[in-house]
Image: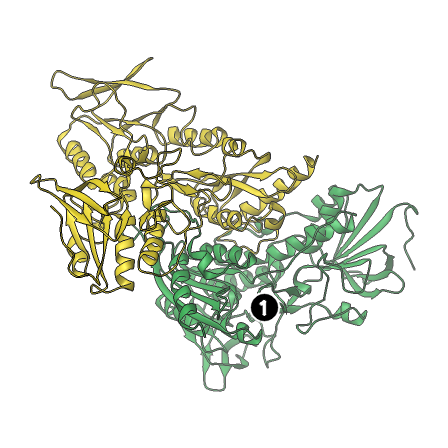
Chain colours: A green, B yellow
Amino acid sequence: MSMSRTSRSTERLVVIGGDAAGMSAASQARRLKGPDELEIVAFERGHFSSFSACGIPYWVGGDVATRDELIARTPEEHRARGIDLRMRTEVTEIDVAGGRVRARNVDSGAEAWTSYDKLVIATGARPIRPDLPGVDAPGVHGVQTLDDGQALLDTLAATKGRRAVVVGAGYIGVEMAEAMINRGYEVTVVNRGKEPMATLDPDMGRLVHGAMEGLGITMVNDAGVTKILTGDDGRVRAVGTDAAEYPADVVVLGIGVRPETALAKAAGLPLGEHAGLLTDLAMRVRGHENIWAGGDCVEVLDLVSGQERHIALGTHANKHGQVIGSNVAGGYATFPGVVGTAVSKVCDLEIARTGLREKDARRAGLQYVTVTIESTSRAGYYPNAAPMTVKMLAERRTGRLLGVQIVGREGAAKRVDIAAVALTARMTVEEMTALDLGYAPPFSPVWDPILVAARKAVAAVRKNAG
Amino acid sequence: MSMSRTSRSTERLVVIGGDAAGMSAASQARRLKGPDELEIVAFERGHFSSFSACGIPYWVGGDVATRDELIARTPEEHRARGIDLRMRTEVTEIDVAGGRVRARNVDSGAEAWTSYDKLVIATGARPIRPDLPGVDAPGVHGVQTLDDGQALLDTLAATKGRRAVVVGAGYIGVEMAEAMINRGYEVTVVNRGKEPMATLDPDMGRLVHGAMEGLGITMVNDAGVTKILTGDDGRVRAVGTDAAEYPADVVVLGIGVRPETALAKAAGLPLGEHAGLLTDLAMRVRGHENIWAGGDCVEVLDLVSGQERHIALGTHANKHGQVIGSNVAGGYATFPGVVGTAVSKVCDLEIARTGLREKDARRAGLQYVTVTIESTSRAGYYPNAAPMTVKMLAERRTGRLLGVQIVGREGAAKRVDIAAVALTARMTVEEMTALDLGYAPPFSPVWDPILVAARKAVAAVRKNAG
C-alpha cells in the first residue's frame, strides 16, 4: 500500500523524528514554503514532540514543576502550522531506491508506505543501557524521554527508601545526582572512570570529585557496575561492582547515549566511526541528494581536531534543523561544525569545557602546552567573588588555542563562551591576551580569568618554543 | 640640579604615575630586568599606588568594607620589589630634549630634575568638573581617587539629610546612584542626555531609565546643570538647572573624565582629537623612541571603526602597562586596540555594550542594520530565567558584526564578551549563528540570546541586501 501524492506539483518532505532537529527542520521549511508547494509529513514514535530532554534532570529534581513546561511545541501546535505530524508512528524501514519510508502505528500495529521527494532523518540517540543482570528491574530508570522522567518520578513517589545510586558521572550522571540531592536522597555515584566528568581532563575532574563530596554525594570512581541486585519483591535493592555492593532504593542510569541509526544503517546510508550518520556541510547525508540528517543521530565536524565526533546536545540539534529546513526549502545554509562546548552544574558547582582535552589533542596529532590558573568571578574585593580554576591548552609553537576547561562557582561556566568564539576564530593565546572583555568589579577581576590563563599559556608556549 | 646616574651601564626608567598603567609597566619591566640592568624610578603625586578606581562606587555603597581592599599593591610592596616609588611627588615638566623630568614634593615643595633613558607616561585622567557656581561647596564630591571616596564617606557620615543628587548618568553616575541607594539615600540623577547611559543607543538607554525608576531613583533627563545652590552655612542645598532645582544634602559628580595630558602637551608630545597621547602599537609615543604612554592618558585604536577613542578603564590600563613593561625591558608586545566593551550595573540591572552604537557607525562611514530581541538568561522553564534585551548592529551587505548592547538582569552583562571576541575576529552575524556556545538549561536557552540576535540580524542584512 502506498499513499498517493496530493498533486504532482507539490513536493513531499518526510521527517523521521518529532523532536528538536526534525521539527526545527520541518518548521523552518514551512516558514519558507507554503503547503501548496511543500507537503510535510513527520513521524514520531513517542508521545511527545519538541521537548527539552536537557530539562529532564531539573524536572525530576523539582526545579521545573511540570512536564509540560519542557514541551516547546505540542503536536497540535505543529499541525496548526501545517505540518502533518503523526505521533506514535514509528518508521521501520527507509527504501532509499524507492524514495519511501514504511511506518507503523505503535498502538494499532498498522503499517503503510509513504513516498517522499525529500527526507530528513532525525532519529536522535538512545541511552546506553548496559547489558547487566537486573537492569530491567523495577526501580531502575533511564532519563532520556519524558516518559522516562515520569516513570522515575512515579517510582520516587512510591518508594519509601531514600538511597539513590546514579550509574555514570558524565553530564547526565552529575545532573541526576543534583536532582536526587534536591529530592532529599542520599546519593551515591558509581563511575567507571578515574574521576567524574570524563569530558574534562582527570586533573579537572578531580576538582568536581572534591566538590561533589562536599555536597554530601558519595563518589565511587574506578568502579564498573557488573550487576543490579534485586530483593524478594523483584525490585532493585543494590548496585554491584566486582568489589562492592551499593544499597539502592532507586537507580538512575546516566551513562550517555549512542546515535539511533539502526534504520539508516539498514538502508545503507553512510555511518562514521561513532555510528552516527555522515553529512556534508549543508547537513545532507553524504552521497544522497535528497536526504538530510541532523541532531543526535549524526556525527559533527570538530573544528579544532578536524575529526568527526558524536555530541548529543539540543543546541546543535536546533541549529541542524534550521540549516536543514532552509536547504530543503531551496534556501542555503550550512553547519560548519562544533568546537565541543559543554556546560553543566551540580548544585552550585559549575563545570564547562570547550575544544580539546589532552587526550583529544594527542589523538588529533597535536602537540600542546597546558596551564592551570586560579582566579575569581568578580574583583577579589567585591562581595561573593567566587573561585574558579581554568585550564587552557595551546598548540606547541603556534600558540593556537586548543581548549579550555573551567570548574568553579557562580559565573564560571558561561565564561567558556569566550574561548569557544576564540577557537572558532582560530586565535592564538597571545591574541587572546588582548581581548577586550567586559570589566567592572561586580563582573570580573581587572584581568578576566580567561585572560589570566591566556597570559600564562603565552609564557608556556614561549618556554617550549623548540 | 640634576640627579646623577648610579652607573653608566645601568639604564634608568622613569615612570610618571603610580597607578594601574604606570605600576604595571614598572612591575613587568622589573620582572624582566634586575636592578643592576635597569633602575626604576616612579613618581606619584597622590597618597596611594595601584588602586582600583573602578571599585570606589562599591566602597562608597558599602559592598567593599575598607579602602585598603581597593589597593592592589602599596608603595612599600612596590619598593620591596625594587621600584623606587616616590609618593606625593608630582612631575611638573618633561624635558624631552634633555631626557629628564622635573618633580616636586607636594608636601615640602622641593623640586629636582631626574634624568631618564626611558620614560613611561601614565598620568591618567582627571574628572570633568563643570565650571559651575558653587561646584566647590562642601557636600559636592567627585569620585576619582581614594581621597575623593574618603571625603564623600566623611560627608555622608556627617550629614543628616538623605537626599542625594548625582550629576551625570554614565557608568560613574549610575554606579554612584546604586551606591547612594545602598546607603539609604533618596536619589535623583540629573542627566544632560535624552536617556541615561549615553554609551548605549537611546532606545537601549530608555530601558535603563525605566529600570532605574523601578529602583526608586528619580531620573531627570535632558537637564543641564547650571548651578550648585548653597545654604547659609555654605554647604550645598540644591542642584539647579534652567528649569528646576533639586534639593540635595550631598551631590556626587559623575560626569566622566578627560585624559590628564597637560604635561605631555607642554612637552610637545603628540595628542589626538580627544586630547589623549597618541602611541604606536607597542604603546610608544609616536615619534619618540624612548617614551611610552598607557592607561587613561592615551587614545586607543577602535578596531571596529578604525578610529582613535579615549576610554578610561582599568583593564586597558593594566594591559598597556604589561605591553610597555615588556617593550621597555627589551621584550616585544603590542596592544592591538579595543572593541569598546563595557559592563556595569545598577542594583540588579545589568548593562553592557561592545563595538559601535548607531552614531559611532555613522561617524565611521559605515551603513548598518539593527535588530533588537528579547530573550532570557536561562531556559525559559528554568527557575530565575531573567529577561534581557539584546540590540545588534551589523554592516549592510557584508553582514559584519558592528556592535552589541545588552540590558537585562543576572547573566546579561558578561554575555557581551561573546560579541567582543566575534568583533575582534571580524565575524559576520551569519558566522555567529553557528557559534558553539555553552548550553544547559540553568545557563542559557537552547538558542543563546546572542544567537537569537545574530539570526535576526542575518535576516535584516538579507532584507537590505541592495
Q: Position of residue B383 (x, y in %)?
A: 47, 48
Question: Residue at position x 86%, y 60% from top?
Answer: A100
Looking at the image, residue B446 sits to the left or right of residue B249; the answer is right
Q: Position of residue B289 (x, y in %)?
A: 34, 50
**Residue B66 in view here:** no
**Above or below for A407 versus B234:** below
What residue is shown at x 43% (from left), y 23% (from top)? B194
Vertical arrangement, residue B196 with respect to residue A164, above or below: above
Residue located 27% across and 46% down the image:
B52
Chain on which label 1 sits: A
Q: Is residue B352 left or right of residue A330?
A: left
How many discs appear? 1
Residue A251 at x, y percent in the picture: 52, 71
Q: Image quadrant for the N terminus of chain B? A: top left
Q: Amino acid at mark 1?
A: Ser
x%, y% of residue B54?
30, 43
For label 1, the residue is A305
In front: A36, or B91? B91
Q: Of B329 and A94, which appears nearest the observer?
A: B329
Q: Residue at 18% across / 27% down in the picture?
A: B139
